[in-house]
Image (cartoon, helix red, strand yellow):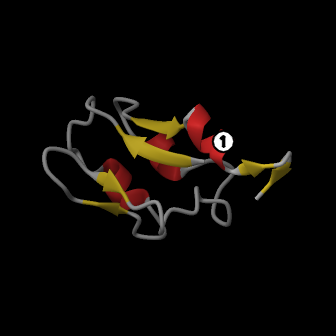
Amino acid sequence: MAFAIGFQCIACGACHSTCPTGAIQRARPRFRIDPLLCTECVLFAGEPLCVTACPVRAIVELIPAPTTILNSTINGVTK
């Protein structure tokens, strides 16, 4: 799953400084997570470090849209 930083972000930088892969980058008005760099801290911790570091719980897990799920299935076989 991918993660995103929501509008609650206060740009404190806690997530940025805890990200071991450099996936969190400064952007305006808030930080952003590069999904190509984010590993969800699988090799580093039991859960994403940015989620636990965020004081306002602005980092949320994105759920794929139903159309994305439908488009990835052809003839009952998932790609």
The residue indicated by pointer 1 is: 69
Residue most extreme to the right: 76
Q: At which x and y percent is residue 69?
A: 66, 41
Given residues 70 and 40, the one toward you in this image is 70
Q: At which x and y percent is residue 39?
A: 58, 63
The answer to whether 79 appears left or right of 51 in the picture is: right
Q: Quadrant of the C terminus?
A: bottom right
x 21%, y 59%: residue = 26
x 47%, y 69%: residue = 37
The answer to whether 18 appears left or right of 76 in the picture is: left
| Total number of numbered discs in the rendering | 1
Given residues 68 and 59, the one toward you in this image is 68
Hey, which quadrant is residue 8 in on the image? top left
Residue most extreme to the front: 75
Q: At which x and y percent is residue 19?
A: 44, 61
The answer to whether 24 appears left or right of 69 in the picture is: left
**Disc 1, SS:** helix
Q: At which x and y percent is residue 62?
A: 51, 39
Given residues 65 and 42, the one toward you in this image is 65
- Is 21 located above or below residue 18 in the figure? below
- Is 42 located above or below residue 22 in the figure? above
